[in-house]
Structures are given as structure tokens and as C-alpha cells.
Amino acid sequence: MASTHDHPGEQAAQDAIRLIAIRDTPLSVDEVLRAVGDDAAGGTALFVGTVRNHDGGADVDALGYSCHPSAEDEMRRIAEKVAAEYPVRALAAVHRVGDLRVGDLAVVVGVSCPHRGEAFEACRKLIDDLKHEVPIWKHQTFSDGTEEWVGA
């Protein structure tokens, strides 16, 4: 009798990367969720990063993201690495650049896998590696007039 892991649905999809983008327009959780939909996936994990009104104990008044021209290629490289490491059926990642307000979506990533544990792990690996390796920089202006640049 064949193992359940022998079923094609238990394997990573050949074309798992469905959406990789850097945009200067508002992001959509629904778009990412649709992009990672897959009939063989039993688990889908999403991470939504939003602009918060504070950082490091200070009130944030304004925030802007900028990126290096290679940022989207770096996102794809990381996505390919995650898709190779986990049985990813579908993966999507979008990041916003430009001026954002408190509550705006800054990043949305999603991963679907045959099982929930794999989906959670792959999604966490994807967002953690994007945050650490993709050349996207955050410029924060605080209510006391100070500023800070943060990024990979």
C-alpha cells in the first residue's frame, strides 16, 4: 500500500510561486488569499503586517517605505527558497512602498501547504526572511520630531 506522502497533493507544486510584488498602491489580503488557493492544500497561513502608531516607546506620526531596485528579485529568491524547503502548494508575497498611515497594510504574505503545521512554518520563514534580507527600508517620523531609518 502506498504512503500518503506518495500522493501528488502531498508534494510541493511545480509552480508554487503565484504572486510576488512591490507596490505603491494599497495591498489586498483577499488578493493574496486568492493567489494561494489550492485544492490540494489543507492549510493556508497568512501574515498581515500593518503600520502601528508606536515603535520603541515613541509615538509614530508618519512612515514611508522605500526599496532598492533589486527588492522584488530578492523577494522571489526567498520565495523560491521557502518553496524548496517546504511542501508549498502556493505562495504569495506583496510589500508596499511609499507613504503609509497608521493602520495601512505594509506587507501581506500567504502560503498554502498540504497540512497546517507546514503552512505556519513556511509562512513564518517567508516573512522572517523577507524582513531580514530584502532591501526595503522604513523611515519613521516620531511625534517628538525625531526620525529613524530601519531596514535590511
Image (tube, rainbow, N blue to C red):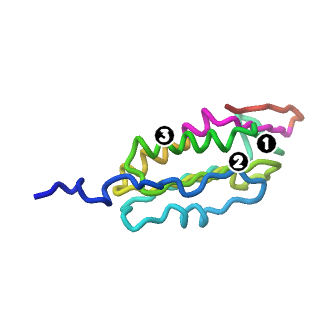
Q: Which of the labelled discs sits on residue 60, or is there none?
A: 1
- Outermost residue on the front side: it is 14
Q: Work out how far the residue at label 2 is from the one at label 1, CA to CA, in angstroms.
A: 8 Å
Amino acid, disc 1? Val
In what element is the residue under mark 3?
A: helix
Q: Work out how far the residue at label 1 is from the one at label 3, CA to CA, in angstroms.
A: 34 Å
In the picture of the structure, the residue carrying the numbered disc 3 is 81
Range covered by the magenta-colored residues: 128-143
Query: Upstream in the sequence, badge 2 or badge 3?
Result: 2
Residue 74 placement (x, y as % from top left)? 62, 39
In the picture of the structure, the residue carrying the numbered disc 2 is 52
Left or right of 105, for residue 120:
left
CB atoms of marks 2 and 1 within 8 Å: yes
Q: What residue is at 79 percent from the left and 51 percent from the top?
A: 100
Which dot, 2 or 3, sits closer to the camera?
Answer: 3
* Up-down relation of residue 4 to residue 39 (above or below): above
Disc 2 crowd, CA 10 A, few/some/many (<14, 14-19, 20+) = some
- Outermost residue on the right side: it is 145
- 76 magenta-colored: no
Residue 12 placement (x, y as % from top left)? 38, 52
Query: Upstream in the sequence, badge 2 or badge 1?
Result: 2
Amino acid, disc 3? Lys
Disc 3 crowd, CA 10 A, few/some/many (<14, 14-19, 20+) = some
Q: Work out how far the residue at label 2 is from the one at label 3, CA to CA, in angstroms.
A: 29 Å
Q: What residue is at 54 percent from the left and 67 percent from the top?
A: 34
Residue 68 placement (x, y as % from top left)? 75, 37
Disc 1 crowd, CA 10 A, few/some/many (<14, 14-19, 20+) = many
In what element is the residue under mark 2?
A: loop
